[in-house]
Image (spheres, rainbow, N blue to C red):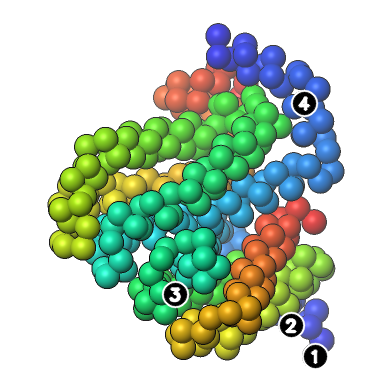
Amino acid sequence: MLEALVAKLADTPWSIELHESLYMYAITESTHVIFIMLFVGTIAMVDLRLLDLAFRQIPVSQMLSKMLPWTVTGFVVLVISGAMLFMAIPIRTYHSLWFRLKCIMILIAAINIAIFTFKVERDKASWDLGPVPRKSKICAAISLSAWVCVIVLGRLIAYNWFDCDNINSPAMLQLTGCPADAG
Amino acid sequence: MSIYHTAEMIEASALGQTIRESTWLFPAIESGHLLALALLGGSVLIISLSVLGVGLKTSPAEIYKGARRYMDGAVIILLITGLLLGVSEPVKLYDRQAFWVKMISMVLAIALTYFAFNPMVRRGSSGVVIRSVTVLTMASWLMVAIAGRWIGFS
């Protein structure tokens, strides 16, 4: 079902125009990379604070509230540019092992954010300037590692080692959802 | 000896060949370069946003104390990984306009950061001069990143 949807997307004029345009794809990809600096950059600073590795004299509540709008701005631009990049090359990206792993890492990061927001940071008033509790440090460590993986996996999508026409093993075909006769 | 000849010599070097011929080395170094870019972005932004009055309310000088080693670390990793990437394909880079734009904006960005932005933040300067320096510093790093990405497209 998803497969058919992706194939349909690939046939839309939007997809074809994005793919064939001389500059639009390059501009979209550059935008995607630039906004990593804003998104992951601000997240990393907050995580370093939670890990007691920097900014110990700045209250955690201030760190979270003042950085969040910038992180969200980065996120919005990354989702839009990311969706455009997918739309430009839908079928190959859909079957990309790296893209699939990247989606899983984003999901893990999102669940981690939800746990932090709805459970862990609720009593932050009591440790705003004091020692950061262990559970917060664990969230920060998961966040940093997940986003590092997302960046690396995103970069690897460009490489064709495991593209449908380069793989043969049944396990890889299973993981990538490639048709068995492609190679 | 011309720059082009030097590029040819670097390309033929053992280090250049090793990186070029390995499947994983180039992507691995590239990933390190990107991760350091994110760290640089975060550490420069957290100070800059505060200088411009749209970030933390803590004084920029205080934020600088915490961000400094991450900024320095990011710049060092970017220089080392960037050098390794360059060593693997210097002849291609020699021909790319985007590469030279990147090198010029990088020198500008490093000079602005270490000779204007950082010293002024440390001194606790305020007013239109430090704000202008901040915007210029951010713009020059942005230029480095854009030109860097463009090397792959041109």
User: Which residue in the structure is indicated by mark 2?
Assistant: B6
**Chain letter behind tag 1:** B
The residue type indicated by label 2 comes to Thr
Residue positioned most to the top: A1
Is label 2 in contact with label 1 (beta carbons under 8 Å)? yes
Question: What subunit carries mark 3?
Answer: B
Q: Which residue is mark 1?
A: B1
Label 4 belongs to which residue? Answer: A14
Mark nearer the viewer, 1 or 3: 3
The secondary structure type at the circle numbered 1 is loop
Question: Which of the two discs, 1 and 3, labels the residue nearer the N terminus?
Answer: 1
Q: Which residue is mark 3?
A: B60
Q: Position of residue A82 (x, y in %)?
A: 60, 37
Per the image, label 4 sits on a secondary structure element best described as: helix
In whole angstroms, how far apart are the C-alphas of marks 3 and 2? 43 Å
Based on the displayed image, in which of its 4 quarters is residue A117 positioned?
top left
